[in-house]
Amino acid sequence: MDESAKRILVLGVGNILFTDEGVGVHTVNELEKSYDFSDNVRLMDGGNLGMRLMEPIMDSDLLIVVDAVLGDGEAGSLYRLTGDDLRKSLAFKNSMHQTDLVDTLIYCEILGNRPEAVIVGIEPYDFQSSGVEMSEVLAERLPEMMAAVLAEVAAAGGSYSVKPALAEE
């Protein structure tokens, strides 16, 4: 790996048991199935692990969080959030079960490495019903979510290619 290349962590977060709340995890899983990435790019299913994500986050220069976002838009609206807007992400909400990701990033900074962070998000249609499938609204937008993540990866100096088996189809 080129030592000067930014270490990029693409982190899909959310609970896949609550329909659209799992969109980040679903997106990362589809990216892993469909693309090969350069050595400086790591994809990870972060689920709702909170503080247990500190080590992989601290080992990155750029954190791309893929998540459902409550942005007051129509269901399926895509968002790119940075800075103070990070709190709109569902992963950054307070929870009885975890420290939110904003706090996790603050702890990373205290310990010496808080990576630059960006959220690629989408407005959920339904994030409260139980179910492992995303709503039809978000399922239709999945290719656009994937394209937005790939654009962030490329802008940060990562590269990707369609997996050979898929390129032949």
Image (tube, rainbow, N blue to C red):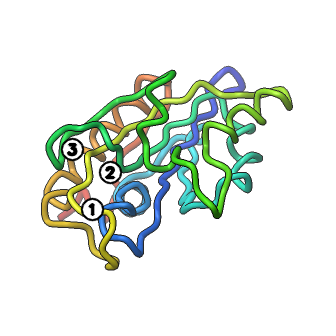
Label 2 sits on residue: 162
* 51 w.r.t. 4: above or below: below
Residue appearing at x 52%, y 40% in the figure: 38
Residue appearing at x 44%, y 27% in the figure: 85
Label 3 sits on residue: 144
Q: Name the amino acid type tagged 1.
A: Leu
Q: Name the amino acid type tagged 3.
A: Glu
| Number of the front mark, 1 or 3 | 3
Label 1 sits on residue: 166
Q: Name the amino acid type tagged 2.
A: Val
What kind of element bears circle 1?
A: helix
- Mark sitting earlier along the chain (3/2): 3
- Mark sitting earlier along the chain (1/3): 3
Residues at circles 2 and 1 in contact by the CB criterion of under 8 Å: yes
The CA distance from mark 3 to mark 2 is: 16 Å
Residue 122 position, x and y percent, is 28, 45
Q: Quadrant of the N terminus?
A: top right
- Which of the pair 113/168 is nearer the observer? 113
What kind of element bears circle 2?
A: strand
The CA distance from mark 1 to mark 3 is: 18 Å
Residues at circles 1 and 3 in contact by the CB criterion of under 8 Å: no
Q: Is residue 153 left or right of residue 128?
A: right
